Amino acid sequence: MDTKHCAVDGWVDAIPAPGPRTGTATFDLIVRPADIDTLPDDAPDTVVTCTSGDPRITHELLNGIQPGDLLRATGTLVQPPAPGEPARLTVDALEVLDTALIPVLQEMVLDRYGDYCVIFDTDTDAVPVFTTHGTWVGLADNPDAIATLIDLHERVNGGDA
């Protein structure tokens, strides 16, 4: 197996997850070539599967890294065992080069009414209502009907949200 110590810059594809062994974390980096402008528009990105067992890196991956963050991961790169499979990088140093923008919901708003959560959507008058524990309460026909739906739920369930 061909290995190489290197640094790879790429974007985090999804929220990092606990790894297969206790105390490890795993994530995928999406890497684009430096000469991306010379490649065809449909050229695929390279995916590098990364794993770390370093407690500091694992903590940062599981608590501070979000999809879209630009990272420099340094470690030992193992070439893929078969064509089309991702390369694997065992990370021993991690640097955040840029953070992803925080998404701003412009068309939906989540609001809380005591022990209840509602979702306002600009595309509809109907308002989904849940308890703060995630139990479905119902669909209010419009924002004015939320209180009636919550009152009905509390009467049926004895005041338990």
Image (cartoon, helix red, strand yellow):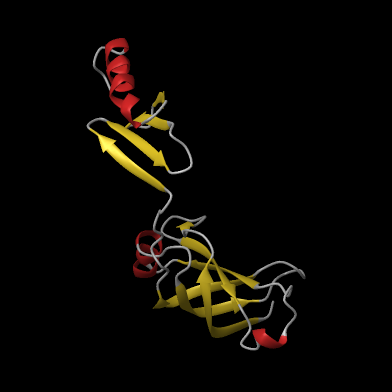
Q: Residue at x 48, y 77 (%)?
A: 73
Left/right placement of residue 111 relative to residue 32 reads left
Residue 106: x %, y % from top left: 41, 54
Residue 103: x %, y % from top left: 41, 60
Q: Residue at x 72, y 83 (%)?
A: 39
> Closest to the observer: 103 or 52?
103
Figure disc tally: 0
* Picture layout, residue 92 above or below residue 111: below
Left/right placement of residue 143 relative to residue 51 reads left
* Picture layout, residue 71 above or below residue 147: below
User: Which quarter of the rendered picture does the C terminus lie within?
Assistant: top left
User: Which quarter of the rendered picture does the N terminus lie within?
Assistant: bottom right
Q: Quadrant of residue 138?
A: top left
* Picture layout, residue 132 above or below residue 149: below
> Closest to the observer: 131 or 87?
131
Q: Residue at x 31, y 15 (%)?
A: 152
* Picture layout, residue 45 above or below residue 135: below
Residue 21: x %, y % from top left: 48, 56
Residue 15: x %, y % from top left: 47, 58
Inspect this view and state whether residue 132 appears: no
Q: Quadrant of residue 155?
A: top left
> Closest to the observer: 94 or 154?
154
Q: Residue at x 67, y 76 (%)?
A: 79
Inspect this view and state whether residue 81 appears: yes
Left/right placement of residue 159 relative to residue 143 reads left
Furthest-right residue in this view? 83
> Closest to the observer: 71 or 160?
160
